[in-house]
Image (spheres, grey):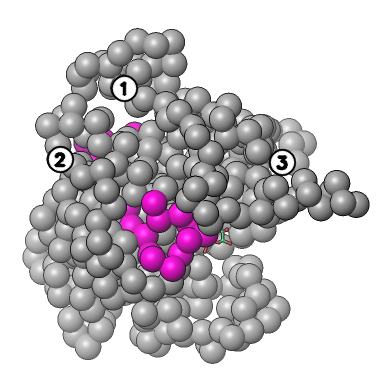
Amino acid sequence: FAFLFNVSAQFDANYDESKVPEFKLPDPLKTFNGQKIRNYKKWESKRRPELLNFFTENMFGEVPGDLEIASVDILEESNNALNGKAVRKQVDLVFKNRGKTLDFTILIYLPKTEERVPLFVGYNFYGNHTITEDVEVIISEAWANNNPSFGIINNQLTEQSRGVRTNRWCVDKIIEAGFGLAVIYYGEVDPDKDDFSDGIHPLLYIDDQQQPAADEWGAIGAWSWGLSRAMDYFEQDEAIDESRVVVFGHSRLGKTALWAGASDERFAGVISNESGCGGAALSKRRFGETLWRINNRFPHWFCKNFRNYRKNEEALPVDQHELIALIAPRPVYIASAEEDRWSDPKGEFLGALYATPVYELYGKKGIEQTEMPAVNYPIQNTVAYHIRTGEHDVTEFDWEQYIKWASEFIK
Ligand code: GTR
């Protein structure tokens, strides 16, 4: 028993910078067989594809087929939302395959203007009705994680949780700045549990397949797929400028935003708020959450191949700075919170810093200082980064920075 105890103690979360193991970070500008990449053409023809393949097959998993929107149903629409300031639409995207149907609803607020508007799109954790007090927002019937403080007890969302997450979505500020906001309840695309019989996965199984193969999509891959289908819809919506859509996400959904932006180049920018392990934070630092912890606690998030790197980070031929680099030259914002050590703020900063050489191939400005900035002092270039005071959350401070940055780099 002492032996077992020691083994698990060895893999407890480390919060001591002096215990971060020595590691060699792969060079984003050197191919797996050692060829140096000197310009963006070679990056695009050689290096980017091999990195994208690696992340696809070994981390997020392949989407095993094409599935187009079968129908778009406008469930509700109003020109008089948010006290007359905005247009609201609730748009249901329906998918059908193998006799199965899946649908998810996009809640969209747009500023009132004749022009096509840029947009933030992101998932929420507890339903579209949580992001605003707006009584017209439809409550999802999809499975939800229980959370008694939000009145979620039988895995069902209820009226009690209306508006409980307004603090995480500054809808008014976004609209006033001339951006639209589109949100989706992530549980409608794939319920966040280790069960591959529900959500989108079964629509793309072959024959009697019960779960994804080792290189096929986990939940993050599925959520990311959903964002791309939302983008398919934005391309059809005359009020939205599909060339200026920024994908946003917090935490596990910040990991999702990075993968959506990396795997779908139609997204004009990415904001990854406190995405931590498997997101913007370098895995090889093993600080806070590790690959062992994340794959054991959330076995459904990544593809099964990713388990090969549990307690084995040194074997990874990539790290998360290269996931961020896949977004280049498009703007990307990585953000941390001082007290959110589980997400490893320094590892997130280094992810942004070491993605910078790829941005520089395009003449874009990334992170130019090697030291972390002071708390609450954002660095806003094509690659942006901030660490703010406080805990794991999305705050008004965060949105103020995102709006300011997007107004300069996206609008
Ligand atoms: C934690 C998980 C993190 C992060 C977070 C969240 O339990 O360990 O990787 O994703 O959840 O999504 O809030």
Magenta segment: 326-346
Report the front residue among 30 and 205: 30
The quarter of the rendering in which ligand 1 is drawn is bottom right
Tell me, yes or no, whether the highlighted magenta stretch contains residue 330: yes
Disc 1 secondary structure class: loop
Q: Nearer the viewer, residue 134 or 280?
A: 280
**Numbered mark located on residue 372 in the image:** none
Counting residues from the start of the chain, the first of labels 3 and 2 encountered is 3
Task: Tell me: residue 260, above or below residue 191.
Answer: above
At which x and y percent is residue 362?
A: 16, 30
**Residue type at numbered disc 3:** Gln
- Whether label 3 lies within 8 Å of ligand 1 gets the answer no
Q: Are marks 3 and 2 in contact (CB under 8 Å)?
A: no
Which callout, 1 or 3, points at the residue further toward the start of the chain? 1
Q: Amino acid at mark 2?
A: Lys
Provide the residue designation for mark 2. Answer: 365
